[in-house]
Structures are given as structure tokens and as C-alpha cells.
Amino acid sequence: MNHTKNDLEYSSVEEAASNLLVHISEFINVNTVYIAKKEIDHMQVIASYNREAPIVDAELQVNYDDSYCQFVMESDDAHFKTINLTEEEATAHVKLAKELGVKAFMGVKLYDKDDREFGTLCVMDREVRNFSEKEINFLQSLGQTFNSIIHLDQTQQQVDLLSTPIVPVTEGVVVLPLVGFMSEDRSSRLLANVLHQVKEKDLDYFILDLSGLVTFNNLLINHLISIIDSLALMGITAVITGIRPEMAMAQVEQGAKFKKIFIAASLEQALQQIGFSLIKNEAQH
């Protein structure tokens, strides 16, 4: 399949997925198409399309050993397919198919900009069916397109991370918005980037806005805690805003680690809680 210029004009995986997943569903004639990112111990769905039955949600998280993506990730051919997940010898022991009510499955492996395993692009259907070579080739071709988009997306995120200035909100208060995917490399560089930018500033509060993040996992949580502890040593109080429901669940699982962290639903709420008002601040100027 030859790609047109428009194939690579998407600015992010999410933007591409909103369009391309629909085309995949139509061409292969399947109910569900999704992209899942491989985390340390689980697969995190970051985009999905369900033509009719809502089988896979866009924020579904499945333990790696309980997912069908594992068969794609571990395949020597970088793809895996079966006409019936419940009867295939390799997959019959995994119970998820019965829970989701699916049988036919096909997936291809996705790679990041450093040619490391990123995750999978998969299709599912509730009917038993045998995917043709043409359909396999089509999915692999779209997988290559997503690889290119992932490469561009990650490159831009790294540039953004290093170049995005910490934004002054009011005297003694700054905010750093985090967006996109937080890979292990990006998470590990975050602490150095934050400390580098605040070392010469006279700050009381440092706000980390997580509302633009696509992924939120234990690795990022640990890095956030390191940032918060480091800022505390500098006499700066860290504030986290923009936490979505799935992020809140991750915090609950972390237990005591988050008990002393200052968390607010939004930037405005954070400023109100620490004694500032955007309206008052604007009026002063």
C-alpha cells in the first residue's frame, strides 16, 4: 500500500487514530480496532474505535499476561492472528475473550523512534473469521504509518519537554504543563529539567498540570514523587493539577506515597487553595 502525503500529516497518535482506526474497521470489516501501549507490566489502550458493540474502551488497561497483545509482542513475525481466541491452542487459557465476547483477533507490533517495541495495533470481532493475506498486509501497512506518527510524536514531545518554558502564573508561582506520552526516558529527564529551570527562580509553589497527559503509570508516579521531594528540599511546594479518574485510581493504588502531596482539580482551584486569585492578579496589572 502506498502512503499519500496526508498519511503522515497527523500531529499525534490520537489525531491519527481518530481517523485511521475507522478506515481499518471498514476495510477489514471488524467491529473493534485499537492501539495499546506496552507499559512495564500491562497494556494500556490509548485509542480505540468500536463500530457497533463497545468492546474495547479508549482507556482500558489489562495486565500483560492477561492480554492478547502479548502474543503480538512476542511473535517473531511481529504480528499474530487467530480465527477464534477461545479455541486457539496458544490463547485458549486467556479468559479475556469470553469476558469481552470476542473470537477473531489480529494484531501487529508498533515501534517507537528508537526502533524499540512501543505496543500493538489490533482488530477484534465477535464472529469467527479467517483474515486474508490482503487484510494482514493492510494492517501491517497501517502499522508502519502509525510507527512514523509515533516517531514524529515522540520527537516533538522531547523537544517540547526541553524547550517548554515554565510559565509564571503570579509572584512566586509557576506552572509546567505535561502533555502526550511519558516514556521511561522522558520521565527520567523530567526531574533534571524541572530543577534546571527553577534553580535561579524565587518560588513558593510549582504547579505540575497533568491534564494533557496520555499515559499515567507507576513509573511516572515515582518520578513525580522524586520531583516533589526535590522541590521540597529547595523550599518549594509542589502542586499537582488536572488528574483524571484513571490517574486518581493509580494514586489510590500507590497508597501512602500520595498522602502528603498537594493536589487540586484545576489550576484555578490550586491558586485559590494557596491564597491567590487569577482575577485579583489580573486586576493588579
Image (spheres, rainbow, N blue to C red):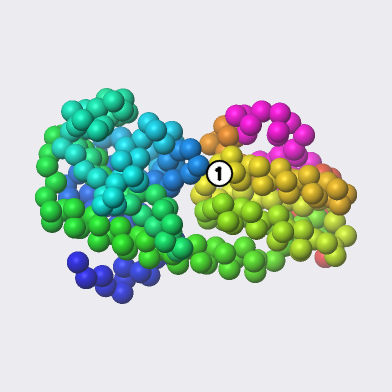
Q: Which residue is mark 1?
A: 216
Q: Is residue 1 visible?
A: yes
265 lies left or right of 98:
right
Q: Is residue 282 above or below residue 39?
A: below
Q: Horizontally, is 216 left or right of 48 in the view?
A: right
Magenta region, residue range: 251-273
Q: Residue at x 39, y 33 (%)?
A: 65
Assign the N terminus to one quadrant of the image.
bottom left
Q: Within the magenta stretch, is there residue 265?
A: yes
Q: Nearer the viewer, residue 161 or 63?
A: 63
Under mark 1, the amino acid is: Phe
* Quarter of the figure with residue 72: top left
x and y, in percent, of residue 144 in the image: 31, 62
SS assignment at label 1: loop
Q: Position of residue 7 (x, y in %)?
A: 31, 68
Q: Nearer the viewer, residue 240 or 157?
A: 157
Which quadrant is home to the C terminus? bottom right
Q: In this image, 191 relative to 70: left or right?
A: right
